[in-house]
Image (cartoon, rainbow, N blue to C red):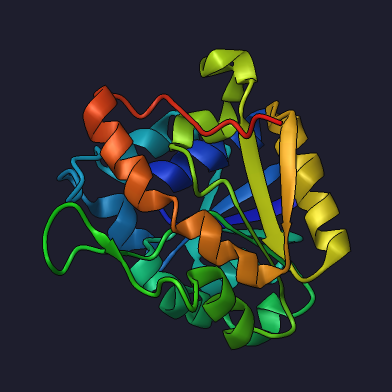
């Protein structure tokens, strides 16, 4: 597949590298490719400069949002949740129409410091906001309940014996994303329902963050026992 991953942080890099490793044609989308590649300092999360990662992943292209998305069959939203709508708008509504947007981001609000809160929350979700803003796209919320390493290598936690969720209005889009998840090695994929069910998946983040602090590692995930 031709895949555009929007976002140059750790999540975007990890999933882009994994897709490339599976043989997909992958490009990372960013607002200003030249500026992204020119940075020499770590980002606010301490992630090394993008150019260092790209030097070891030269098969992954780097393009402006609109250029990255225009030729893509699948779009992955791995941007910071607070900037997701702006990034997708920059990609162009016409470029998103009819395409699957695999939304793996979370609407984390750091305005009051750590730990972050969620905005929106409870009566809305980032997944829903994206679907409303781009009604001709097929938004599927998934993978937001785990860290990037576990997203692409579920076996690193309990041998892969844990759960991943999908939410979306389009059954075919959810089936396509489920196939992608299984390609990464996920075995227990649970369809939560339409895109409004993304509220529940996103609201797992507060407990995820507390677990991260309590366990001292992000290498964990939720398992739905039944």
Residue 55, horizontal then vertical, whole percent: 40, 33
Residue 84, horizontal then vertical, whole percent: 44, 71
Identify which residue is drawn at 57% across, 25% down.
153
State which quadrant residue 54 falls in.
Answer: top left
77 versus 54 height, above or below:
below
Residue 145, horizontal then vertical, whole percent: 49, 45
47 versus 158 height, above or below:
below
Q: Is residue 34 left or right of residue 85?
A: left
Identify which residue, 122 or 19, lies in the foreground: 122
Identify which residue is drawn at 39% across, 75% down.
120
Q: Residue furthest right?
A: 172
State which quadrant residue 218 falls in.
Answer: top left
Q: Residue furthest left?
A: 113
Residue 166, horizontal then vertical, whole percent: 68, 53
75 versus 208 height, above or below:
below
Q: Is residue 59 visible?
A: yes
């Amino acid at each position: 597949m031709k895949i555009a991953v929007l976002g140059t942080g750790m999540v975007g890099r990890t999933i882009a590298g994994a897709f490339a490793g599976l043989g997909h044609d992958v490009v990372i989308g960013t607002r200003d490719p030249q500026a992204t590649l020119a940075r020499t300092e770590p980002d606010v999360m301490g992630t090394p400069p993008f150019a260092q990662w790209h030097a070891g992943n030269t098969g992954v292209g780097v393009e402006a949002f609109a250029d990255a998305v225009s030729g893509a069959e699948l779009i992955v939203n791995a941007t910071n949740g607070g900037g997701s709508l702006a990034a997708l708008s920059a990609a162009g509504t016409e470029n998103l129409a009819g395409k699957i947007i695999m939304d793996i981001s979370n609407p984390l609000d750091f305005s009051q410091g750590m730990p972050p809160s969620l905005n929106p929350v409870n009566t809305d979700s980032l997944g829903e906001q994206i679907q409303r803003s781009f009604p001709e796209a097929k938004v599927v919320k998934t993978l937001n309940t785990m860290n990037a390493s576990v997203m692409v290598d579920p076996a690193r936690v309990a041998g892969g014996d844990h759960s991943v969720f999908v939410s979306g209005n389009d059954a075919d889009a959810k089936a396509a994303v489920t196939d992608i998840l299984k390609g990464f090695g996920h075995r227990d994929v649970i369809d939560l329902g339409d895109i409004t069910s993304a509220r529940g998946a996103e609201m797992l983040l507060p407990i995820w963050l507390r677990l991260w602090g309590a366990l001292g590692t992000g290498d964990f995930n939720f398992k739905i026992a039944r």
